[in-house]
Image (spheres, helix red, strand yellow):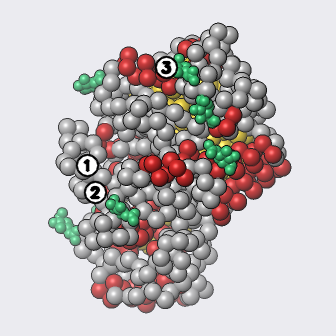
């Protein structure tokens, strides 16, 4: 079927003025390679029961198709055959009406020679069953005239994939800025907004000396404006946006029972206005978020690297369930089992996100890596949904605490753990300077110091053996310059990274100098989700809590729970700098961005540079060095005193 170089294609190609290699237009849209349509059999990974029937929204004959026995890309191939048979592989019967682009455009996962481009046309005729044909164009300048176009092509999209449109732009040059746009094949006056992205350098490029990434997590629509996205979009020198999870939230957002947040006053109640379970629900939720103008602008301006956390499925997800769902009768929500819910969440994520599926035989795998010249290797992990052992589900906290040190427990599953450790070793061997680890949850040990809440077993603290295996890999292989990035917790934490068992060992790690640390961790606060310190504390209360937290966690050098925001990491060959940005009031659409504190790491040091934040008092939060006098105060096993 792929050899669809038929004469019938010629008229359309001539019409849109293209001479590209002929690929079936439907197949060219990578959305059809998304897990639900193209992955059969083991479907949502190892342990979950087999994927069963596939979900097809399209009505008429296609809806009835049973893909049970279909494996690999055959389901997608079959769809292509069906459409070509029905509409003509020359697209002669494709939709001819108007389309709009209310969700904007997005680019993601750039390599040195390609990137994923995304849009989501909406046909004006919402009853059409015809495929929508879009052409895409990539240009080195914002001028798309003929000589400037470096890649172009066309593809169809249909309601089978919720009209998501994902193509891989290729033939690109490394470390180059590009503009891109989409328009209707039949009418060039119907054009999307123009988007922008930059390719990565070649993996072996030793000259590249600059990379700046803006890192986000936990964007909850009803809780306030996405000022953090606006802040980063206004910065010209950000190369990449990275979202490490909780891009959407699954709960209702109108303050009703069971909802998380109340967006009514700000007109930010996401659709559908209920907790989401089905494919339609998840699709509508993404659509609702993507209408946010700050989010849309940042997608339009930068390429993103994304991984999910729990809320892209549901609160505190793990391989077999979430806090409120599993495959038993009690965990089935509105008739939707956990397996069905997860499949829908995964499919909608692939439809809406400009991410690559690096292994089309593994529909649940989003963990992947990027090589930014010899300056940095970036591992994007999935500590959440791929193969995580059972987590804290609120009703089992004591059990999880008791098993948190079991060697058999894993956050990532064996396959991903092995891949990750091999990557770290390979990065060191190939001479990549910085090892960025983009992942969801707080890595280092964190004692919250509240009688009702001491340890978050839903973070790495619930999977200590996995953490030891990772730090062993770093220590035994002398892996330098590791920087962990984390989110999930709705507060900011900056650490010298150490083994938990060094907590009481003054010989192994010295908190006054950072000597002995194995790397650093930058954990960012939420874009908008409420502080884990508590929702409406005064500034003084937030500061007092931050001060207390840095005195009861020996390697925690900075803590802040008083602001929502994001951080940037800027790398050069000699040093890394992190800027933590905060907003005090997200109920204002144009809240002022504050630079709270900055952190430096010298190449080869593997700890934060002292004095931290140049000895300045942070704008919000507390530094350990500001509160502790290391000459007078000693760690007594639970606190400095
Ligand atoms: C398509 O719809 C948009 C938005 O309503 C409108 O501005 C545009 O003129 C329409 N284009 C055509 C060709 O009808
Ligand atoms: C199409 O749009 C009309 C007008 O907004 C609306 O009433 C109708 O429910 C929509 N139909 C479908 C199938 O979405
Ligand atoms: C399934 O989920 C329900 C709802 O959260 C919970 O009450 C029940 O204990 C869970 N059952 C299992 C076996 O995990
Ligand atoms: C955790 O497990 C490790 C390795 O099995 C062991 O050395 C250590 O003593 C255990 N820690 C606790 C607190 O049980
Ligand atoms: C945030 O801004 C809103 C709108 O001006 C105001 O009502 C509210 O009091 C502010 N909140 C804080 C904590 O300053
Ligand atoms: C450090 O010492 C304190 C007090 O003795 C103890 O509660 C804590 O578990 C120790 N931490 C580790 C990682 O051994
Ligand atoms: C350590 O110091 C803290 C703060 O002063 C105190 O609350 C705690 O009881 C001390 N722990 C030990 C084991 O002395």
Relative to 282, say whether 305 is above or below. Answer: above
Give the class, few, some or many, for how many residues have Cα within 10 Å of label 1's Cα (few <14, many ≥20).
Answer: some
What residue do we see at 23% from left, 54% from top?
A: 273
Q: In which quarter of the image is the N terminus?
A: bottom right
Classify 586 as above or below 15: above
Q: What element carries label 3?
A: helix
Q: What x and y, as percent, mark residue 98?
A: 31, 65
Instruction: Left or right? Give the position of 525 relative to 7.
Output: left
Q: Mark 1 points at which residue?
A: 259
Spot the residue most to the top.
632
Q: Relative to 364, is 433 above or below?
A: above
Q: Does the residue labelled 1 lie within 8 Å of ligand 3?
A: no
Q: Is residue 206 visible?
A: no
Position of residue 497 measured from the top left corner of the image (x, y, whole percent): 66, 35
Q: Residue at x 52, y 49 (%)?
A: 402
Mark found first going from the N terminus, 3 or 2: 2
Q: Position of residue 19 (x, y in %)?
A: 59, 73
SS class, disc 2:
loop
How many numbered marks, from 0 up? 3
Pointer 1 or 3: first along the chain: 1
Identify residue for label 3. 547
Say if mark 2 contacts mark 1, CB within 8 Å: yes
**Residue 517 placed where, x, y %?**
72, 32
Q: Mark 2 points at which residue?
A: 275
Q: In front of the other: label 1 or label 3?
A: 3
């Amino acid at each position: 079927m792929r050899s669809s170089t038929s004469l019938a294609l010629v008229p359309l190609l001539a019409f849109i003025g293209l001479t590209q290699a002929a690929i079936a237009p439907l197949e060219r849209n990578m959305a059809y390679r998304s897990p639900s349509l193209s992955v059969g059999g083991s479907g949502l990974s190892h342990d979950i029961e087999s994927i069963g029937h596939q979900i097809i929204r399209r009505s008429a004959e296609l809806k009835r198709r049973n893909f049970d026995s279909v494996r690999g890309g055959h389901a997608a191939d079959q769809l292509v055959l069906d459409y070509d048979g029905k509409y003509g592989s020359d697209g002669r019967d494709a939709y001819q009406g108007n389309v709009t682009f209310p969700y904007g455009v997005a680019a993601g996962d750039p390599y040195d020679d390609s990137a994923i481009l995304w849009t989501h046309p909406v046909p004006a005729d919402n009853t059409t069953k015809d495929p929508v044909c879009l052409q895409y164009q990539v240009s080195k300048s914002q001028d798309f005239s003929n000589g400037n176009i470096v890649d172009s092509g066309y593809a169809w999209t249909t309601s089978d994939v919720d009209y998501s449109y994902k193509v891989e732009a290729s033939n690109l040059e490394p470390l180059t800025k590009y503009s891109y746009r989409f328009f209707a094949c039949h009418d060039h006056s119907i054009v999307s907004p123009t988007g922008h992205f930059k390719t990565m350098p070649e993996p072996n490029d030793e000259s590249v000396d600059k990379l700046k990434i803006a890192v986000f997590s936990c964007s909850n629509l009803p809780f306030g404006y996405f000022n953090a996205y606006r802040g980063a979009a206004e910065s010209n020198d950000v190369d990449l946006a990275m979202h490490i999870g909780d891009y959407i939230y699954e709960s209702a957002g109108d303050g009703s029972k069971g909802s998380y947040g109340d967006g009514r006053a700000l007109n930010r109640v996401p659709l559908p206005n209920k907790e989401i379970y089905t494919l339609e629900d998840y699709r509508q939720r993404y659509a609702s978020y993507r209408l946010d103008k700050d989010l849309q602008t940042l997608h339009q301006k930068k390429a993103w690297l994304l991984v999910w956390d729990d809320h892209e499925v549901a609160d505190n997800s793990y391989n077999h369930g979430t806090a409120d769902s599993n495959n038993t009768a009690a965990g089935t929500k509105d008739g939707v089992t956990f397996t069905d819910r997860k499949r829908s969440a995964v499919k909608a994520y692939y439809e809406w996100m400009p991410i690559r599926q690096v292994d089309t035989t593994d529909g649940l795998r989003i963990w992947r890596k990027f090589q930014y010249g010899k300056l940095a290797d970036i591992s994007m992990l999935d500590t959440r949904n791929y193969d995580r052992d059972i987590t804290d589900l609120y009703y089992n906290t004591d059990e999880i605490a008791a098993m948190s040190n079991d060697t058999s427990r894993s956050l990532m599953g064996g396959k991903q753990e092995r891949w990750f450790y091999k990557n770290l070793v390979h990065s060191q061997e190939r001479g990549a300077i910085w090892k960025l680890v983009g992942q969801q949850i707080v890595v280092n040990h964190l004692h919250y110091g509240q009688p009702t809440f001491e340890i978050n077993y839903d973070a790495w603290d619930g999977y200590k053996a996995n953490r030891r295996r990772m730090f062993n890999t770093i220590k035994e292989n002398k892996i330098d310059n590791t920087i962990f990035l984390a989110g999930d917790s709705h507060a900011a934490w900056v650490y010298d990274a150490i083994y938990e068992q060094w907590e009481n060992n003054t010989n192994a790690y010295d908190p006054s100098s950072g000597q002995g640390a194995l790397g650093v961790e930058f954990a960012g606060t939420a874009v908008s989700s409420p502080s884990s310190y508590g929702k409406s504390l005064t500034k003084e209360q937030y500061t007092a809590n931050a001060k207390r937290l840095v005195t009861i966690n020996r390697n925690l050098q900075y803590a802040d729970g008083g602001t929502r925001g994001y951080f940037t990491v800027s790398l050069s060959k000699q040093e890394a700098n992190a800027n933590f940005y905060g907003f005090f009031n997200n109920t204002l659409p144009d809240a002022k961005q504050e630079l709270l504190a900055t952190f430096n790491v010298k190449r080869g040091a593997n700890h934060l540079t002292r004095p931290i934040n140049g000895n300045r008092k942070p704008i919000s939060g507390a530094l350990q060095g500001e509160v502790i006098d290391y000459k007078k105060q000693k760690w007594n096993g639970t606190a400095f005193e």
